[in-house]
């Protein structure tokens, strides 16, 4: 499967936006400057961009699986290998740190810890479900990704077009049921949120791509750039439109459509650098919080005034350094080893079946 570099660039934009958003949040909490949140709140939309990209990638990466009897198992195994090991390692590191820090681990109930590892939303720290964060706080988005993978895996029994229409119908039905019944149980309210329609937007773009639909390159660039401009203005759009789907999901879909259907690509150091960041975006998403929070806390403890923008630049550089190191030294080798192990196991089963 050929990598679409423009999608990697969008993954980089999404991850960098999330890092910037969390820097603004921690800076504001630590130094009492509420302007920091307002300035960089656009980064919240980075998750919505990730969701649209995820919908596209699932369709694109599954082109050889549609209609196969082993497709659901193959697909879900690949997803588990890609998502779970590094996430569990980071979560275990967080949990170990919580056990060391006085008082923090006392609030971690067994149910909360198990739910965090199992990708099940848990009403923590707010019992009413207004906050549903696992131990690795930004992992809340993975609690949407995993059910989406399960739905998509089951849909793969069908041919491509039917699979994507079927998966989209299930997600749309879940949102419709949530809108009609307004469930009070936090987990059901979480899993029927409109945000899951962003996976549908990505899948539909992926279907158009796989069916051979293409846009003229100038149109693609216009959509790509326009989507990014709307991404930067997402906080204003959010204040105007409310929710996430319209102010954040639709601009993300516009950018993804332009990047893929319009064949957007470029050369040069900036583009290549963004592609590298895109490849390491999952590691960046999982590991940046401790770096960002640590940067702000370190300057505060030293009694050094940390100007906002230089502090953001430093936090981004340190977060990128850690993420790229984790990607190349841990995530990529671990993923490759697990995939090779899975392939070798499948071959052994095939040989055993033939001999029997």
Image: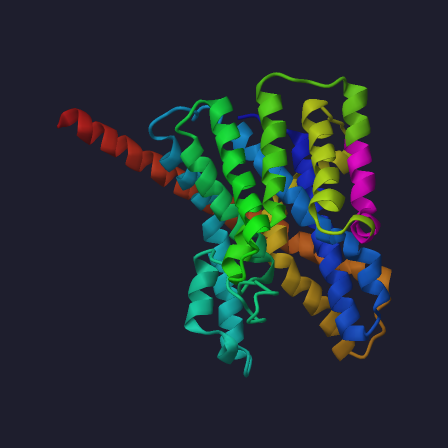
Query: Which residue: 62% across, 52% down?
Result: 285
In the foreground, 203 or 82: 203
Query: Which residue: 58% across, 32% down?
Result: 203
In the foreground, 168 or 22: 168
In the foreground, 307 or 48: 48
Q: Is residue 320 visible?
A: yes
Farthest front residue?
Answer: 180
The x, y position of residue 242, in whole percent, is 76, 51
Number of marks in the rendered image: 0
Is residue 229 magenta-colored? yes
Farthest left residue?
Answer: 356
Quadrant position of the C terminus in the picture = top left
Magenta span? 224-239
Identify whether 204 is placed above or below 293. Answer: above
**7 left or right of 157 in image:** right
Q: Is residue 313 visible?
A: no
The x, y position of residue 349, in whole percent, is 24, 33
The x, y position of residue 254, in whole percent, is 73, 33
Query: Which residue: 59% across, 49% down?
Result: 179
């Amino acid at each position: 499967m050929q990598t679409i570099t423009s999608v990697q660039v969008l993954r980089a934009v999404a991850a960098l936006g999330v890092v910037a958003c969390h820097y603004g949040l921690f800076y504001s909490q630590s130094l009492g400057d509420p302007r920091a949140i307002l300035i960089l709140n656009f980064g919240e939309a980075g998750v919505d961009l990730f969701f649209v990209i995820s919908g596209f990638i699932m369709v694109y990466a599954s082109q050889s699986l549609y209609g196969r009897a082993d497709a659901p198992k193959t697909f879900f195994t690949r997803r588990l290998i890609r998502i779970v090991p590094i996430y569990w390692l980071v979560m275990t590191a967080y949990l170990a740190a919580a056990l060391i820090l006085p008082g923090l681990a006392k609030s971690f109930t067994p149910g909360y810890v198990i739910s965090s590892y199992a990708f099940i939303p848990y009403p923590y720290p707010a019992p009413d479900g207004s906050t549903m964060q696992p131990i690795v706080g930004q992992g809340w988005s993975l609690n949407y990704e995993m059910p989406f993978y399960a739905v998509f895996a089951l849909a793969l029994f069908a041919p491509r077009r039917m699979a994507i229409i079927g998966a989209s119908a299930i997600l749309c039905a879940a949102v419709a049921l949530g809108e009609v019944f307004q469930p009070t149980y936090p987990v059901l309210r979480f899993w029927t949120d409109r945000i899951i329609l962003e996976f549908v937007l990505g899948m539909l773009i992926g279907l158009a791509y796989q069916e051979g639909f293409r846009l003229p390159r100038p149109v693609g660039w216009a959509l790509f750039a326009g989507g990014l401009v709307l991404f930067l203005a997402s906080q204003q759009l959010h204040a105007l439109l409310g929710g996430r789907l319209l102010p954040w999901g639709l601009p993300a879909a516009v950018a993804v459509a332009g990047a893929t259907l319009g064949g957007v690509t470029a050369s040069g150091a900036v583009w290549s650098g963004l592609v590298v960041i895109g490849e390491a975006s999952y590691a960046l998403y999982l590991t940046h919080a401790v770096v960002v929070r640590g940067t702000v806390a370190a300057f505060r403890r030293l009694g050094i005034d940390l100007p906002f923008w230089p502090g953001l630049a430093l936090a981004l550089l340190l977060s990128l350094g850690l993420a790229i190191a984790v990607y190349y030294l841990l995530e990529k080798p671990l993923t490759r080893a697990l995939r090779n192990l899975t392939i070798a196991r499948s071959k052994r089963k095939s040989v055993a079946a033939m001999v029997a």
